[in-house]
Image: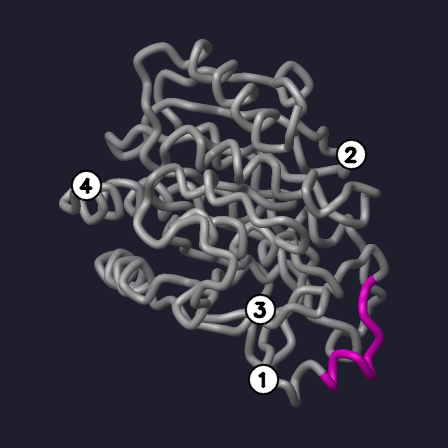
Amino acid sequence: MSYFDDVSEAAQFLRAKLGRLRPRLGIVLGSGLGAAANAVHDPVIVPYESIPHFPKSTVEGHSGRLVAGTLGGTPVVVMQGRVHFYEGYSPQDVTFPMRVMGALGIRAVILTNAAGGIVEGYKIGQLVLIADHINLMGWNPLVGPNEPRFSFNRPNGGLRFFDMSDAYSKRLRQVAIQATEMEGQTLEEGVYLAVSGPSFETPAEIRAFRTMGATLVGMSTVPETIVARHMGIEVLGISCVTNLAAGLSPTPLSHTEVFEAGKQVERKLAELLERLAMWISALVDAEP
């Protein structure tokens, strides 16, 4: 069987589990942010290990469950944790869940992550919209033969060479800014730089990243964004600043710090995701 066949088999398995539910929006929850899935109504919970060919998360703070239901009245499928390249998975494994979401028919995806803050002024627990990214992982998940069937009949999907100038949808970012303004809050935009990990960055690397224009650093999201855009899916990225990057914090960096900071902002993130689900659904459903 081919990689496409594996994705199709996993999607078929999930359709049987979800019954009449047809998700329109996908959500991926990063390190320490998994409890935001508790806001999903009438949830159908499927452990990753029960899904054919699905990779299993091995990192603390990633529950390894798929939660489907409604959020803000919108049919959604939520990944409660993701897998990473540094766990030993291949690029195709890392992006397999996003491919399956595409096969399920989602029109847009919200990618969340725990990130280190590079610029002065970021606060622990702050949510930052991703306006663009810099890929320093050293690889691209689309290397190899192109599979045009991954378009799943979406416009501009399945192309080998496709535009990434609007990788993080401008209109979805505007929706997110409006949603937070209604609550009397503000949402800054930043540039996310992705590295492979698992070691944290050195102070010299952080200084170099800052000169490149990055404001956030992490070990995920970029591969999922590339694959989502390859399938013609709109992407909204949200980083939670869970630690200050190397050289900016007086204490040594640790995954425990990342996990605890994520837990502190889960409720705030869940409330934002619920509002965004309703607004984004109305936006994409207005299109043919």
Helix, strand or loop at disc 1?
loop
The magenta-colored residue range is 200-208
Question: Where residue 192 is drawn, which disc sits there?
Answer: 3
Residue 102's x, y, as percent?
Answer: 44, 37
Q: Tell me the amino acid under the disc marked 2.
A: Thr
Q: Which residue has dot 2 on it? A: 58
Residue 112's x, y, as percent?
Answer: 52, 50
Q: Main secondary structure of the magenta part?
A: helix
Helix, strand or loop at disc 2?
loop
Q: Residue at x 65, y 52 (%)?
A: 141
Residue 137, image quadrant: bottom right
Q: Which residue has dot 1 on it? A: 213
Q: Residue at x 63, y 61 (%)?
A: 115
Q: Tell me the amino acid under the disc marked 4.
A: Asp
Residue 60's x, y, as percent?
Answer: 75, 37
Which quadrant of the rendered structure holds the C terminus? top left
Instruction: Find the distance from the CA under tag 4 to the CA under tag 1.
Output: 35 Å
Q: Residue at x 55, y 19 (%)?
A: 9
Between disc 4 and disc 2, the foreground one is 4
Front in this rendered view, residue 41 or 57: 57
Between disc 4 and disc 1, the foreground one is 4
